[in-house]
Image: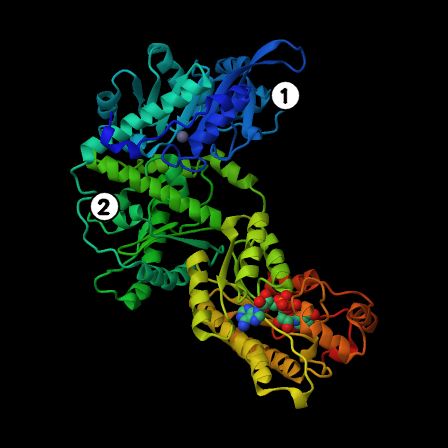
């Protein structure tokens, strides 16, 4: 089948030798991870898998059947064994006696914890009854694009019959829950030879008697759908025809960089949002097409797609052929306010007496003809995943509207999912967000000692961080370390020389495209130099001025420009030096340039105040550990200046301090964190010395 299109088909990745080493739960996990590794099989976090496994009861030692099923949350592709809930099958069966009918189905969720096997702490998901009541031992529930394309077609049932005959059945749309579990049980009883069922507007259920067979059936059924769609649509142009041309990559990025801080500013008044830009081929084909406005208005179909992407996307008014960006930006506030009104209208039309209060009415997905798609959410992973989900939805719409008429989920059903009390309870259980959640920070000199410690501190409080540095090798090393610790989503890096106006502009535009804008600038890049004034060359003098004074000016100017466009306030911190306040022997260029930083900070505090932009200074002193400055000539020069050898120098500084303590990069990071966080919301134009006490640098 489908001989010409084998590249589009899913490949069987099952390794029998490996599987032979696994027990039943191990095989279930193996199957789940294989299925989840391909987004065509299921979207991130979507779908679930199960196996009914004979195990010894921990109390009696007797054999009992245990349902292993993916628990609440989690993702089949990346889950571990602890992601499965385990429940006594006989207790689940007994629950049927307690069922009072569909209007009470939500109460059944409360009984599930009573069925827990072996004190497993993983909460069961709402989909548990869908697996429990299918009599077959192994069950997969997936959200494959190709199947949803059929499930979301107006004549989905007829198409399912045409493609699969009696092998795969059809159940109309029903919100997942206890009732749907009973529907599945009935279906299996009446169709003992069927190998699965398509759920209208939702996805696929398949089953078999072994883990390997179940995997094979799932793949076979999805491949059959891919193949059928491929044959039907081979000669068709997707989404009608293209009515916009795709702009060149650089121009697409440029427009996204312009739009993202503006949108972010307009939608982050209640909660800070992080952005994500996607201009993949599938997205570009959709946003340039004739049918895009009509299809986008229908919203998504699969409840998973819908929950992540909101009722529908917003189409940004941009025409790539006229390229009038100013008009596009000018129109944004009105466009967004209309979207919010429409959302409030949807809420009012659909709400029930006990519905939770209306949530954030801003769009998640923004479609831009010729350019791509921007998504905004409370954190980077959510924004990125929302883009993945909308891409799944685009794939569904492409195929579905080619072979039939695509249908979104009916408005009331969509609402009942979005504002489901069980969904609300899940949201309420989410941990409180961290103090810098949703914020974006750029740290210059981010590869260095103080810079990387500061980045670490901000990341640990939930910020997204861009490291900017001139040292490529160290930048790569530092960003990999931080990505390992905090995840790839939240750490980005850009090569940038703070003295180069173009590079600085580019780095800020990069930040806008990576995360949507900026809230925090830590201007920290620096060098140290030492020479008596008679031996200070003009070159050395200028170098200090360029990197420390001019460099701090250039990055702050760019930060101010973006902060003003967002209109959300912001925080700038300069890492200056004790030497900005206290003169030091043989380092006039350095000390003077650092003093200029402090005065620049004060001027900017004055200018930024009315826009809520705070500018403060942290003055470190003698942070030897982890600092590159202290590994070069400076170390020797400072030792010479004080008539010590290099080993004695740390002891000298410690002795010189009032508190007799060594100052660490983490200490500077802590003061910086305070000054960028809301804890210091009422401070600007301030200086915090972090130097273990030094009377010369007392401020006055
Ligand atoms: N370590 C101390 O004792 C101490 C004391 C007072 C002030 N400071 C200040 O703290 C800041 C950080 O110093 P550190 O101790 O972490 O030193 P560090 O050398 O470890 O880090 C500085 C970073 O800045 C980068 N950098 C240098 N020139 C750059 C340029 N033109 N563009 C972009 N990046 C550039 C370097 O590559 C390096 O990664 C500096 O501004 C320094 O003057 C440090
Ligand atoms: Zn599902």
Task: In this rendered view, identify the residue nearer to me: 570 or 362.
Answer: 570
> In which quarter of the view is residue 447 placed?
bottom right
Of the numbered discs 1 and 2, the one sitting upstream in the chain is 1
Colour mode of the rendering: rainbow
Q: Position of residue 426 (x, y in %)?
A: 52, 37
Q: Residue at x 41, y 45 (%)?
A: 386
Task: In this rendered view, identify the residue nearer to me: 130 or 681.
Answer: 130
Query: Which residue corresponds to mark 2?
Result: 294
Q: Position of residue 326 (x, y in %)?
A: 30, 68
Quadrant assignment for ligand 1 = bottom right
> In which quarter of the view is residue 198 placed?
top left
Q: Is residue 615 left or right of residue 367?
A: right
Is the CB of mark 1 within 8 Å of ligand 2? no
Task: In this rendered view, identify the residue nearer to me: 498 or 617.
Answer: 498
Q: Is residue 275 left or right of residue 648?
A: left
List the single residue furthest toward the bottom.
Answer: 534
Q: Position of residue 150 (x, y in %)?
A: 27, 30
Q: Looking at the image, is 43 positioned above or below residue 557? A: above
Measure how far apart labels 1 and 2 are at the Cα level.
Answer: 51 Å
Q: Residue at x 21, y 44 (%)?
A: 239
Q: Is residue 490 left or right of residue 526?
A: left
Query: Which residue corresponds to mark 1?
Result: 118
Other-residue count near label 2 (Cα within 10 Å), few / some / many at <14 / 14–19 / ≥20: few
Secondary structure, mark 2, is helix
Question: Quick one: quadrant of the N terminus?
Answer: top left
Q: Looking at the image, is 223 positioned above or below residue 192? A: below
Q: Looking at the image, is 141 positioned above or below residue 134? A: below
Question: Quick one: quadrant of the C terminus?
Answer: bottom right
């Amino acid at each position: 089948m489908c001989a010409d299109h084998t590249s589009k088909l899913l490949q069987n990745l099952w390794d029998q030798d490996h599987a032979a080493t696994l027990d039943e739960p191990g095989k279930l996990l193996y199957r789940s991870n294989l299925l989840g590794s391909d987004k065509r099989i299921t979207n991130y976090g979507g779908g679930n898998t199960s196996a009914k496994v004979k195990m010894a009861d921990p109390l009696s030692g007797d054999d009992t059947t245990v349902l292993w099923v993916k628990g609440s949350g989690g993702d089949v592709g990346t889950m571990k064994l602890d992601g499965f809930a385990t429940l006594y099958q006989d207790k689940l069966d007994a629950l049927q006696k307690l069922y009072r009918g569909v209007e009470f189905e939500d109460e059944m969720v409360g009984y599930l914890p009573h069925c827990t096997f072996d004190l497993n702490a993983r909460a069961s998901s709402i989909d548990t009854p869908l697996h429990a009541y299918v009599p077959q031992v192994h069950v997969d529930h997936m959200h494959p694009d190709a199947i949803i394309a059929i499930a979301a077609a107006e004549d989905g049932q007829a198409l399912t019959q045409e493609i699969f005959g009696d092998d795969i059945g059809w159940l109309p749309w029903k919100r997942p829950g206890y009732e749907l579990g009973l529907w599945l049980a009935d279906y299996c009883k009446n169709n003992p030879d069927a190998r699965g069922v398509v759920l209208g507007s939702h996805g696929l259920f398949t089953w078999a008697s072994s883990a390997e067979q179940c995997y094979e059936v799932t793949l076979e059924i999805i491949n059959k759908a891919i193949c059928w769609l491929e044959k039907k649509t081979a000669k068709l142009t997707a989404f009608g025809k293209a009515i916009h041309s795709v702009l060149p990559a650089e121009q697409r990025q440029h427009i996204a960089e312009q739009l993202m801080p503006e949108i972010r500013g307009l939608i982050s008044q209640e909660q800070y949002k992080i952005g994500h830009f996607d201009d993949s081929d599938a997205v570009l084909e959709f946003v340039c097409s004739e049918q895009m406005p009509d299809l986008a208005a229908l919203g998504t179909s699969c409840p998973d797609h819908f929950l992540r992407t909101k009722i529908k996307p917003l189409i940004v008014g941009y025409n790539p052929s006229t390229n009038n960006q100013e008009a596009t930006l000018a129109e944004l506030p009105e466009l967004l306010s209309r979207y919010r009104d429409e959302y409030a209208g949807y809420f009012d039309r659909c709400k029930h007496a006990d519905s939770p209060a209306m949530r954030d009415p801003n769009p998640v997905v923004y479609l831009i003809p010729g350019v791509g798609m921007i998504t905004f959410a409370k954190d980077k992973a959510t924004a990125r995943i929302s883009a993945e989900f909308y891409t799944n939805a685009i794939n569904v719409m492409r195929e579905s509207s080619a072979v039939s008429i695509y249908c979104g989920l009916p408005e009331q059903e969509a609402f009942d999912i979005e504002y489901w009390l069980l969904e609300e309870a899940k949201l309420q259980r989410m941990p409180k967000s961290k103090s810098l959640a949703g914020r974006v920070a750029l740290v210059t000199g981010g590869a260095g000692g103080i810079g990387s410690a500061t980045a670490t501190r901000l990341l640990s409080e939930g910020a997204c961080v861009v490291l900017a540095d001139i040292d490529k090798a160290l930048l790569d090393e530092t960003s990999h370390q931080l990505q390992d610790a905090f995840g790839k989503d939240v750490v980005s890096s850009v090569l940038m020389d703070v003295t180069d106006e173009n590079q600085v502009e580019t780095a800020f535009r990069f930040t806008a495209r990576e995360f949507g804008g900026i809230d925090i600038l830590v201007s920290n890049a620096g060098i140290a130099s030492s020479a008596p004034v008679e031996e200070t060359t003009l070159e050395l003098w200028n170098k200090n001025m360029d990197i420390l004074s001019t460099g701090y000016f250039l990055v702050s100017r760019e930060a101010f420009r973006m902060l003003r466009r967002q209109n959300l306030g912001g925080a700038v911190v300069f890492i200056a030096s004790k030497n900005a306040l206290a003169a030091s022997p043989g380092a006039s260029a350095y000390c003077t340039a650092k003093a200029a930083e402090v005065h620049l900070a004060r001027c900017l505090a004055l200018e930024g105040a009315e826009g809520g932009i705070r500018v403060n200074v942290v003055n470190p002193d003698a942070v030897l550990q982890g600092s590159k400055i202290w590994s070069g000539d400076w170390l020797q020069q400072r030792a010479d200046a004080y008539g010590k050898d290099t080993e004695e120098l740390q002891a000298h500084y410690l002795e010189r301090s009032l508190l007799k303590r060594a100052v660490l990069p983490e200490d500077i990071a802590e003061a910086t964190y305070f000054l960028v966080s809301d804890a210091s919301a009422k401070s600007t134009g301030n200086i915090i010395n972090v130097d273990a006490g030094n009377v010369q640098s007392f401020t006055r």
